[in-house]
Amino acid sequence: MPEQPDSIDEQAAEWILRLHEEGFSEGLRLEFERWKQQSPQHAAAARRMQDVINRLQALRQQSTPAKAALNAAFAGRKAVTRRKHALRALLIAGCLALPATLLVQSHYPEQWLADISTGPNDWKTQRLADNSSITLSGTSALNVHFDGQARRIELLQGEVLVDVAHDSARPFFVETAQGSMRALGTRFVVKRQGDTTVLSMLQSRVAAQSANEQQTLEVSAGSRALIRQGSVELAGSISPASIDQAWERHQLVVEDQPLPQVLDEISRHRRGHLQFDRNTLAGLRVSAVLPLDDTDRALQLIADTLPLQIKTYTPWLVVISQLHTPEK
């Protein structure tokens, strides 16, 4: 059966990525030439992909946001998997002859434009220019805005553990779409969760303010707060030592949380798609310590304690459904 055009385009995109990452070694170049010679369709797909690369490379010299995103995409030969997937999508979409600027705006996820980001199952710790330290968990992204008056972290997605260095002349803020947090101490965790920002205080205090600036609340160590566009409210106590340990071990610690919320968090740490019916599973609750470095095992641990069926169709698609006990 002849290969479908989409399959050939995907192969061509993969070849272009390999050549970019690994360099034009003679052996790889000859292998690529043999692939192109398999059919006129193969050669045409390679030309289309190279044309998109040329357009994107040219765009790197233009507008600042596009340049930032594309420099990230093309940086180094050891591009991480998440960049490969997004760049492959760009290459294939580029065959539609869309303007290069529209390609970048339409197909790059927001986090691709971020200063610092992680992919699924990817944890990153980085020391900032002021000697503060940040750790991002899987599929997280943030921007860093430092100047002479203030230090600002803009969390776009996911979760960050912040350890703030003292600087009395420049306050330290973490900002999200739901509000802002001014550090009055050193160590805390901020997580984007739908239309809510979750603040977990590990040391000292943070002044949390809603996005509409109508509510401000000082949150102390051992407390959790929920920040929304128009409100800030306390949401119980936490164990700072347990949270520190969970970050160190890449674990998810949940206590009596709705299953869909837990699955959302697990999904953020794995590649592919977790499919489930939120309404059907909403009544199931989870209390567990789950390994985020092994999300298949995390899912199995949940299934061992709840009436669930997990079906793996491909590594990229897992379907979770509730088992119904037969009526007697």
Image: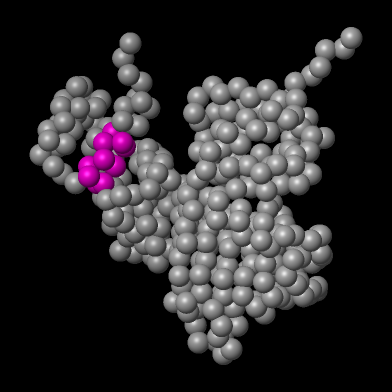
Task: Please provide percent x and percent y for residue 124.
Answer: 47, 57
In the image shown, does 88 or 198 lie closer to the viewer?
198
Task: Please provide percent x and percent y for residue 273.
Answer: 56, 34
Which residue is most to the right?
A: 328
Please indicate, yes or no, whether residue 83 appears anywhere in the rendered image: yes
* Total numbered badges shown on the rendered structure: 0
* Side of 131 where 211 appears, left or right: right
The color scheme shown is one colour
* Side of 139 where 12 appears, left or right: left
Task: Please provide percent x and percent y for residue 111.
Answer: 50, 55
Q: Is residue 70 above or below residue 304?
A: below
Where the N terminus falls, by quadrant? top left
* Side of 45 where 326 appears, left or right: right
What kind of secondary structure does the magenta stretch mostly adopt?
A: helix
Q: Quadrant of residue 283?
A: top right
Q: Residue drawn 13% across and 42% down?
A: 25
Q: Residue drawn 26% across and 40% down?
A: 18
Which residue is most to the left?
A: 26
Whether the magenta-drawn stretch holds residue 17 is answered as yes
Q: Quadrant of residue 279?
A: top right
Q: Residue drawn 34% across and 49% down?
A: 79
Where the C terminus falls, by quadrant? top right
Q: Which residues are magenta?
A: 12-22
